[in-house]
Image (cartoon, grey):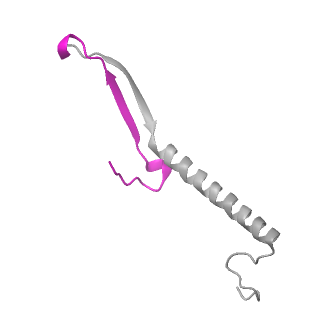
Amino acid sequence: MELDLPEERTYCPKLTCAVYDYMFLGLKQPTIGTFNIPLGRIKADAIQQRLTFTEQSKKLIRALREKLGEPPLGESEDGAG
């Protein structure tokens, strides 16, 4: 299932789930429990984690290029970027 969620964490929904028992061939289905999955928080955390990983990767690439004596990405040999 694909679903476009709002960009703002405040407006992202929670997924509410209910769990039922199945007794006596379905004649009685008492609720065992309910729980919420905070989709907005999960999405925001995943985006932040990806941004952090990307920034750390860029720092590592810069450090490696510097060690190898290569110009930073996006700059030419003559520094005319």
Q: Residue furthest front?
A: 68
> Percent position (x, y) of residue 78?
76, 89
In the image, what residue occupies the spot 29% across and 17% down? 21
Quadrant location of residue 28? top left
> Percent position (x, y) of residue 50?
58, 54
Query: Which quarter of the rendering shows the C terminus?
Result: bottom right
Q: Is residue 34 visible?
A: yes
Q: Nearer the viewer, residue 77 or 31?
A: 77
Quadrant location of residue 13? top left
* Count of marks, rendered view: 0
Query: In the rendered view, would you say 21 is above or below 74?
Result: above
Q: Nearer the viewer, residue 17 or 53?
A: 53
Q: Is residue 27 visible?
A: no
Query: In the rendered view, would you say 37 is above or below 12?
Result: above
Query: In the rendered view, would you say 72 is above or below 11?
Result: below
In the image, what residue occupies the spot 54% across and 49% down? 46
> Percent position (x, y) of residue 71?
76, 78
In the image, what residue occupies the spot 20% across and 10% down? 24
In the image, what residue occupies the spot 46% across and 56% down? 7
Quadrant location of residue 53? bottom right
> Percent position (x, y) of residue 58?
68, 64
51 part of magenta stretch: no
14 part of magenta stretch: yes
Q: Nearer the viewer, residue 9 or 42?
A: 42
Q: Which residues are magenta?
A: 1-27
